Image (spheres, rainbow, N blue to C red):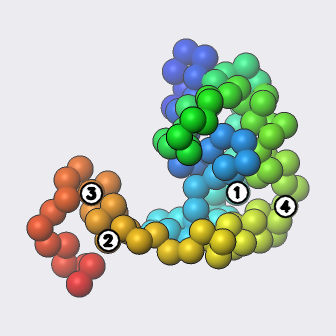
Amino acid sequence: MIVDVAGHIMTGDFLFTGDGGVGRDDLPSGRVDDHWDALSVLERFSGDVVVCTGHDPPGTTMQTLAWNRDSNPVLNMASLEEFASWQAETSARLGGVSKIKTALPANIFAEIPEHVPWLD
């Protein structure tokens, strides 16, 4: 999902800045093929819009879409196969998310519930 707000696009985990690439599709609700197809939406935006991500490493400066088109490896990939391979390599390099059982319910419920039955 992308939200266009007066010269800025809010991309959440859909797109990160520069070599950060994109969000991980190995996490719950991730779908590599849908994510790849959705990246074509970025073609609708001019290069001067500022990309505001959901999170990036501390100290990362927001950049324009044109800058990201030059610097983000995902935006220079030519095929779903190349993207899927990048996703698999990135997931293997980063490993599991240690706090997923806390983070996922917190994102769904906007709080950390006492008990989440499907995570037992």
Are circles 1 and 4 on residues that touch, CB within 8 Å?
A: no
Q: Quadrant of residue 49?
A: top right
Are circles 2 and 1 on residues that touch, CB within 8 Å?
A: no
Secondary structure category for the residue under label 3: helix
Judging by the rendered image, the residue that carries numbered circle 1 is 36
Judging by the rendered image, the residue that carries numbered circle 4 is 79
Residue 14 visible, this orientation: yes
Image check: 75 left or right of 51? right
Residue 2 visible, this orientation: no
Q: Amino acid at mark 3?
A: Ala
Residue 73's x, y, as percent? Answer: 80, 50
Q: Amino acid at mark 2?
A: Lys
Secondary structure category for the residue under label 4: loop
Are circles 3 and 1 on residues that touch, CB within 8 Å?
A: no
Which numbered disc flags the more N-terminal residue, 3 or 1? 1
The one nearer the camera, 112 or 43, is 112
Q: CA distance from mark 3 to mark 2?
A: 9 Å
Disc marking residue 106 = 3
Residue 113's x, y, as percent? Answer: 15, 63
Judging by the rendered image, the residue that carries numbered circle 2 is 101
Q: Check disc 3: other Cα within 10 Å, few if <14, some if 14-19, many if 20+.
A: few
Total residue callouts: 4
| 117 to 11, vertically: above or below | below
- Taking the spot 29% from the left edge, 65% from the top edge, the residue there is 102
- Taking the spot 38% from the left edge, 68% from the top edge, the residue there is 100
Q: CA distance from mark 2 to mark 1?
A: 26 Å
- Taking the spot 84% from the left edge, 54% from the top edge, the residue there is 77
Which numbered disc flags the more N-terminal residue, 4 or 2? 4
